[in-house]
Image (cartoon, rainbow, N blue to C red):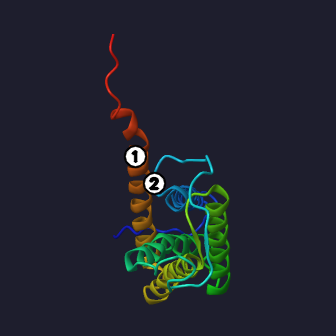
Amino acid sequence: MTASLSLRPTRTAPRTLPAVLFGVYLVLLVWAVLWKFHVPDLSGEGVRAVKLVPFVASEGFGANRLSEMLANVALFVPFGVYLGVLAPRWRVGPVAGLAALASCILEGLQYVLASGSSDVTDVILNTSGAVAGFLVLSVLRRASRGRAVAAVFWLCFVVTVAAALWGASLLGAPLHSLPPLHR
């Protein structure tokens, strides 16, 4: 007798855990994109710039660094995986559209909040990451007849929870670095 993990919705077990984890991931994503995992600064005194030509140096912007481009792809892979878990009947088009919309919103918020430069390259790479995550999950779903979906979801679960704990430790870090209070 073998135990298997299943994410199929039932009357007693709806998809609440994946939905909650997707929400936690989205909060972490916003924090990563807008504030680079620092304490949010809403003063509006930061960088406010737009780069409309992707992948090349232009308009006073340098060329995109490979590490930055890979990070943009990697940040959105879970977006596609979570959508694949939550909406398994979706095709790649709606996933790409939703990822592009989310990325455009984040890039727009970077401009409005002056928290970084808004870059078309980021939108392209973020969307590519989400599509890659969705396609990997789709291929694994077909190849394993659905058995690998639970494993991929639990991997996302562990990574999301670890990232949330790491983020919480970052927020608490400034409190520990203050000098001790004198009595």
- The picture places residue 45, in percent across and down from the top left corner, at 59, 51
Residue drawn at (53%, 58%) of the image: 21
Pick the quarter of the image with the N terminus: bottom left
- The picture places residue 77, in percent across and down from the top left corner, at 48, 74
Question: Which numbered disc covers residue 170?
Answer: 1
- The picture places residue 71, in percent across and down from the top left corner, at 43, 72
Secondary structure beneath label 1: helix
N-terminal-most mark, 2 or 1: 2
Name which residue type carries label 1.
Leu
Q: Which residue is mark 2?
A: 37
Observer able to see residue 93: yes
CB-based contact (under 8 Å), mark 2 and mark 1: yes
Q: CA distance from mark 2 to mark 1?
A: 8 Å
Name which residue type carries label 2.
Phe
Q: Residues within 10 Å of mark 2 (few under 14, many from 20)?
A: some
**Closer-to-camera residue (115/174):** 115
Occupied quadrant, residue 101: bottom right
* Numbered marks: total: 2
* 162 over 183 or under it: above or below: below
**Closer-to-camera residue (87/104):** 104
Residue drawn at (38%, 44%) of the image: 169
